[in-house]
Image: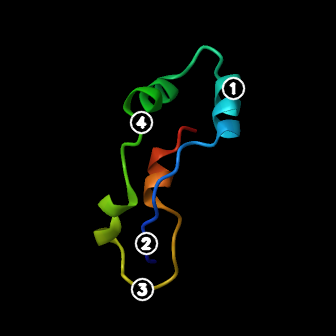
Amino acid sequence: MSLRPTPYRDVPVATAAVARAAFPHGSPYLRLRDHLGTIFTDAQFASLFASCGRPMRSAAASIGSTC
């Protein structure tokens, strides 16, 4: 597997709305994301992956998910 770093984008508005609807009183993970913002980026994980091969899902997106 290879990792091709991509710039991190904000959480889509619809995704944030679903998360807020699912947890109307909040959750520790939602509060953490709101307070700290982006914690991990792909560049932090790039050295852990081969430079060639089948691309994988963004490591930062996988770890930084609010679900």
Marks 4/3: CA–CA distance:
30 Å
Q: Residues within 10 Å of mark 4 (few under 14, many from 20)?
A: few
Disc 1 on helix, strand or loop? helix
Disc 4 on helix, strand or loop? loop
In the rendered image, residue 52, in percent from the top left (x then y), is placed at 42, 85
Marks 4/1: CA–CA distance:
20 Å
Q: Residues within 10 Å of mark 3 (few under 14, many from 20)?
A: few
Q: Are marks 1 and 2 in contact (CB under 8 Å)?
A: no
Q: Are marks 3 and 2 in contact (CB under 8 Å)?
A: no
Disc 3 on helix, strand or loop? loop
Counting residues from the start of the chain, the first of labels 1 and 2 encountered is 2
Residue under label 4, please give it: 37
Marks 1/3: CA–CA distance:
39 Å
Residue type at the position of mark 3 = Cys
Q: What's the mark number on residue 3?
A: 2
Counting residues from the start of the chain, the first of labels 4 and 1 encountered is 1
At x 69%, y 30%, the residue is 17
Quadrant that contains the C terminus? top right
Marks 1/2: CA–CA distance:
32 Å
Residue under label 1, please give it: 22
Marks 4/2: CA–CA distance:
22 Å
Viewed as shown, does residue 39 lie left or right of 33?
A: left
Counting residues from the start of the chain, the first of labels 4 and 3 encountered is 4
Residue under label 3, please give it: 52
Residue type at the position of mark 1 = Ala
In the rendered image, residue 30, in percent from the top left (x then y), is placed at 51, 28
Residue type at the position of mark 4 = Gly
